[in-house]
Image (tube, helix red, strand yellow):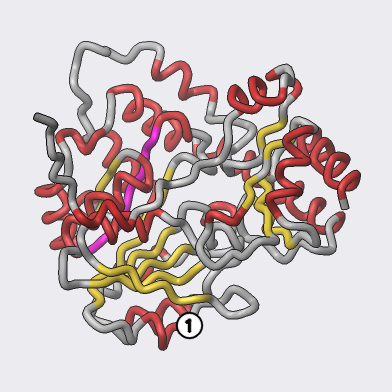
Amino acid sequence: MGISYRFRPALDKLKPYVAGRGIGEIARQYSIPADKIVKLGSNENPYGPSPGVKEAISSVPLHLYPETDELLQALASYTGFSRDMIVVGTGMDGVLDTLSRLFLEEGRSSAISTPTFSYYEILTRLAGAKPVLIPRDEDFRIDPDSLTGVDGSSMIFLCSPNNPTSNASTEEEVRTVVESTGAMVFLDEAYVDFAKKSLISMVSRYDNLIVGRTMSKAFGLAGLRLGYAVLPAPVADQYRRAAPPFFGLSTISVAAGVAALQDAAYMRRSVEKIRKERQRLISELPEAGPSQANFLYLETDRPSSEVAEALLRQGVIVRDCRSFWGAGENHIRVTVGTREQNDRFLEAYRRLC
């Protein structure tokens, strides 16, 4: 007798998260040497983490479970918030996963301004709640009235700077959303180090605002999956109840996070290099709009799938944005790399366009 698996009905509505393609995969598929491939599809920092990170993780006691006290203290010093208002997780997605357990369930809904990071929708559906997808306007700005008018909404997801469109929401826009709803507003600032301004200080003024951050981007720790959030203390208390043991972290990720935070000056130098290259790329690409992130959002004349595929054949990985709900069929996202990487992209892209 065969087994009848009793999967949750919510799984029928899920589409798997689509990550950027990897160097090994492209090397095998197109028979291109791995060292000849330029990866500009996953918004990673090409300069990597502070040299102090490698030194710190080399002496990590792998036989011991992680202790997060030093990491939380380092985050408190970096953000200016007290430890009781800071939580950690395995990247931004780990933080989001735990938060969804606090606020989302069957009979509730979330409001999501699209196109944006698809994991918000995935977590909403997994919780049995209903995601309400609200398109941004033609300039990719959010619609505060529509976001706050969703029936039964217990969470509102905002990403600023937004992935994939690269623009940032204004303080007035975010304030309007927060002040017009009783739902918990999650502001994803994964790319804020590349932007003009962070809105993290607003957490101290509002009881329904959470600001999430990651150390995958500016700090160059994408391979170690380390994220955190600043949130009202009562919410932080509930988060700790619902989080996995040790918040899902490892001794290596904790040590790396502490070392990276202790050398924030290295991160800022990397960010400045990326900003300069970002401006150079924008000046070379009329189809690129303004960006406050470490990537550009380009509109293509040809279908984005064709453009992305043609670039792959030249050893350049970019992100085809068709997997982002509401992005349409004619956008690609390009990470700002080193000057040499960016020149490779420009050369390959100009052959096509």
- Please indicate, yes or no, whether residue 207 appears anywhere in the rendered image: no
Q: Amino acid at mark 1?
A: Asp
The spot of residue 308 in percent (x, y) is 71, 45
In this rendering, the answer to whether 217 lies above or below 53 is below
At horizontal 40% and vertical 46% (from top left) the residue drawn is 16
- Span of residues in magenta: 225-232
From the viewer's perspective, is 143 left or right of 240?
right
From the viewer's perspective, is 6 left or right of 292?
left
Q: Is residue 197 magenta?
A: no
Q: Nearer the viewer, residue 181 or 72?
A: 181
At horizontal 60% and vertical 66% (from top left) the residue drawn is 167
Say few, some or many: other residues with alpha carbon within 10 Å of mark 1 (under 14 / 14 to 19 / 20 or more). Answer: some
Circle 1 sits on which residue?
Answer: 143
* Secondary element type, mark 1: loop
Would you identify the image quadrant in which residue 68 lies?
Answer: top left
At horizontal 39% and vertical 80% (from top left) the residue drawn is 147
Q: Quadrant of the N terminus?
A: top left
In this rendering, the answer to whether 221 lies above or below 121 is above
Q: Is residue 228 magenta?
A: yes
The spot of residue 212 in percent (x, y) is 37, 55
The spot of residue 111 in percent (x, y) is 35, 73
The spot of residue 352 in percent (x, y) is 87, 47
Would you identify the image quadrant in which residue 89 lies?
Answer: top left
